[in-house]
Amino acid sequence: MNILITGVLLLGVASSAQAFTYADDDFELLDVTDEYIEPDPCDGSHTRDPELDDLQYTEKLVNAQVSECAKIFEVGDRGLGGGVVFYTIDDGRHGLEAAPDKLKNLVWGCHGVTVGLGGIKIGDGRYNSDTILYNTSCNNSSHRYPTIFEAVDNYVAPNGVLDWFTPSYLELRELYYSGFNEPYLETEHSHLNYIFSSSEISGTNAYVTDFKNGIHYNIGKDWAISVIPVRAF
């Protein structure tokens, strides 16, 4: 049954009136059951905005990982720097990532000088690296090759991430035993399979891991071999 609604339409200022009617099926019912969806506050938290330079992008990733927007990683995942995650803590919110590149033909530096970088634990790599970069007692000008610390400090990953450091002895060991050593292996120049750590043994030697077999050595700081940058997240 249609319900008729009668109205009056005034025409201009005339006193006459025109009657009109609506049927109930002329009305369109609106669906008011849709709920408002809040935007995700973490959208874009790890993406690179076009206006960001490499340093700003790196800082954005660091800040995101200490927020509620942190990504959760497992060992073997691709990290924020484009490398491989080889160590995690805090249920995957934080850990260590190895760079996608190996840097070659580099010396440890400070040969004949005991810097005091005896830290070998996971977490010591950053301290070791920062300490030697600001150490004025080392004069590396006589070396034919750049040092691992200078090279890693200047390294920028292909995606622009730049907060890398030289791993400590146990950080490097963790990378090898995580099973992701093969991408860093050399076939023609086997000496480049020796990877420096940032951990010092003496004024002339530092800890090294052979990534072909996992054997650990103490090797002269003036050997020109390799280093794999890592970063914490």
Image (cartoon, helix red, strand yellow):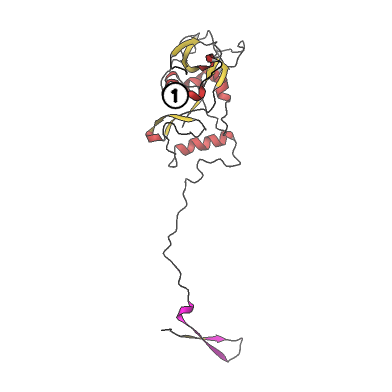
Q: Quadrant of the N terminus?
A: bottom left
Name the residue rendered at 45%, 37% in the picture.
Answer: 65
Residue 17 visible in the shown view? yes
Which is more toward the observer, 27 or 6?
A: 27
Stretch of the chain drawn in magenta? 8-30
Which is more toward the observer, 54 or 103?
A: 103
Q: Position of residue 108 (x, y in %)?
A: 53, 14
Name the residue rendered at 48%, 20% in the picture.
Answer: 128
Residue 135 visible in the shown view? no
Is 174 a magenta residue? no
- Left/right placement of residue 122 relative to residue 47 reads left
Q: Secondary structure at mark 1?
A: helix
Q: Position of residue 74 (x, y in %)?
A: 41, 34
Q: Which residue is mark 1?
A: 175
Which is more toward the observer, 96 or 175?
A: 175
Q: Residue furthest left?
A: 91
How many marks do you count on the picture?
A: 1
**Of the residues shown, which amino acid type is indicated by label 1?**
Leu
Please, is residue 144 above or below residue 6 in the view? above
